[in-house]
Amino acid sequence: MTLPTDPLWPRAGGWAAADGDAADATILGVPTWRTSLSPTGAHATPAAVREALRRYSPTQLGARGESAGAVDLGDALRIVDAGDVAEPDGPEGEAAVRSAVARLAPRSGLVIALGGDNSATYPVAQGAAATGLVTIDAHFDLRDGVSNGSPVRRLVEDGLDPARIVQLGIADFANSVAYARRAADWGITVVTLDELRRRDPGDVMAEALQIAGAGGSAARVHLDIDVDVCDRSVAPGCPASVPGGLAAHELRALARAAASDRRVTSADIVEVDAAADAPDGRTVRLAALCVLELLAGLAVGERRSGP
């Protein structure tokens, strides 16, 4: 589909290639898919998200839509795209992801990884030298083995302090008693889906970052956005999404609230299978909006901190 052109209505995406200079945000494709527990075409998703971004404006409105408060994220932030890690699965692929993120993170306020399935979380968080983790996910991801269901367990076993892990949106009928016990035994903070939806997203995220971001300015929190936390009506392209999950606006609010805190230095958006999406591309479009919400939160955080 050819999109209309309007010089007064710029489009999001299409950001300059990463060139080694400092950036406020860096996009990196991490198209993991080979160890997924469900058949998936998630390796097609980074490209699909980049294409979907072109459907949106980069303009963040001010209070009540006031023009004086409107901000073009492309003007407020230096955003670059580092392309994709070509083969991110397996030990060699994970090493390549870690290396890419470790190279980008020191020169970027926020590294945003476009998955791929949830196995991307493991090498991205390690490459970013994360000291804390917040997941927005229906699942614990504490499974044994190596898959998209095991990144949190693998991070803990490799040294991430489970007392600095907060899991938001853990759902009924999507987990097992054994893994719930594992989370409790390890001291992971869990906010269930039912509790999450009864509370203000900003308050929940602030509380989560107090835990995951313990250590003050030295803390580096990784944010894992697993889109299958959402209701299946808005995320049909997520193999594990179910009826009754979060609304799209709730996920977007959580993403923006997280990125407004400078302790969040890396994030991933995962578990979207672009090849299995609805004909209108609603799941990929939601993932693209999560990118923009992260950038909007980053811009808010920059304005709060001042020059």
Image: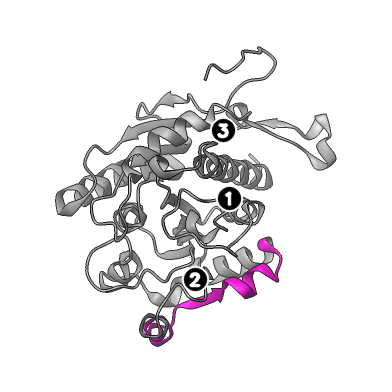
| Residues at marks 2 and 3 touching, judged by CB atoms closer than 8 Å | no
Residue 14 image point, x, y percent:
48, 24
For the residues labelled 1 and 2, say whether their Cβ atoms are less than 8 Å apart. Answer: no
Tell us which disc is closer to us: 2 or 3.
2
In percent of width and height, residue 182 lies at 36, 83
Eye-nearest disc, 1 or 3: 1
Q: Nearer the viewer, residue 147 or 261?
A: 147
Residue drawn where x is 30% and y is 41% of the image: 103
In space, the residues marked 1 and 3 are separated at their CA atoms by 29 Å
**What residue would you read off at disc 1?**
234
Residue shown at 31% from the left, 42% from the top: 43
The residues colored magenta run 181-201
Residue where numbered disc 3 is placed: 77
- Magenta stretch contains residue 23: no
The local secondary structure at tag 2 comes to strand
Disc 2 from disc 3: Cα separation = 28 Å
